[in-house]
Image (cartoon, coloured by chain):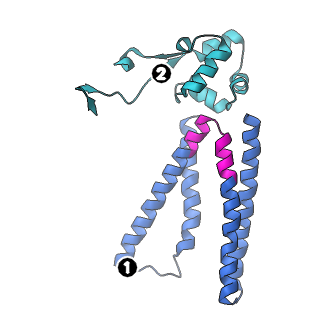
Chain colours: A blue, B cyan
Amino acid sequence: MYGKTRLRKKQTRATALLWGAIYLICLLVIRQVELPTKAGIGISLVPVIFFFIFLITIIREVASMDELQRKIQTEAVIVAFLLGLLLLMTLGMLDQVIPLDQKHWGYLDMVPFMGLFYAIGWWRAHRKYS
Amino acid sequence: MPLVGGEPIVNTVNMQNSIKVERARKNWTQAELAVRIGISRQAVNAIESGKFVPSTLLALKMAHVFGTPVESVFKLETDDWK
């Protein structure tokens, strides 16, 4: 059973890397190439397809995990969600007082932060049960 | 602390276990026990050190591979029965 988890873990890593690469390429294309609006929208939505593949592999991996690994994932996601909420709330409040410059901060800037918050949550939970 | 019928509900439970003793009796490592019950070595270590309380299913599986009743592997401390 645990060998199945390792296989699922590899699949998740592979699809995460694929999604990450596609996301960065699409972002680069949108920012660097002058595209008609329809083509731009199409390219913007390409990472969504790969994200869903990534999502399916994560769900399968979690299903094959033992109960401790699931608890670690749950705690990591709770930390990531709450830190993400805190960041959004703080930026939203600040934006009411000093409107944020869209050149320096946008929706896309939340993506690496959510990844970072998940990593913090996972590290904390992993240490707790090691 | 929440009250039911005037009695406080104890949310934190310290469950004792004799996994280390049972493993030594069988001469198994944590990794060997993990393979036998289909969990990670980290999970065995966390359960054995009392950091993680397993589900009933896992506790029963563990007792089964040791060939002992579940209540001889996992025990509640006296205060936790209140």
Q: Residue A98 carries which label?
A: 1
> Badge 1: few (under 14), some or many (20 or more) residues near its Cα, within 10 Å?
few
Name the chain under label 1.
A
Which residue lies at the image location 44% right of the left edge and 79% below the top edge?
Answer: A100
Residue flagged by tag 2: what amino acid is it? Met
Which SS type dominates the magenta stretch?
Answer: helix
Residue flagged by tag 1: what amino acid is it? Ile
Q: Does the magenta stretch include residue A99?
A: no
Relative side of B21 to A104, left or right:
right
Q: Does the magenta stretch include residue A60?
A: yes
Q: In which quarter of the image is residue A1?
A: top right
Disc 2 element: strand
Foreground residue among A91 and A69: A69
Q: Write the start and end of the magenta stretch as one range.
A: A57-73
Q: Name the residue under label 2.
A: B15
Residue B53 percent location from the top left of the image: 52, 28
From this view, report whether residue A16 is shown above or below residue B80: below
**Image quarter of the N terminus of chain B:** top left
- Residue placed furthest toward the left: B6
Relative side of A57 to B51, left or right:
right
Disc 1 versus disc 2: nearer the observer:
2
Res A31 seen here? no
**Image quarter of the C terminus of chain B:** top left
Which residue lies at the image location 40% right of the left edge and 65% below the top edge?
Answer: A89
Residue B68 percent location from the top left of the image: 61, 10
> Badge 2: few (under 14), some or many (20 or more) residues near its Cα, within 10 Å?
some
Residue A63 percent location from the top left of the image: 65, 43
Foreground residue among A104 and A30: A30
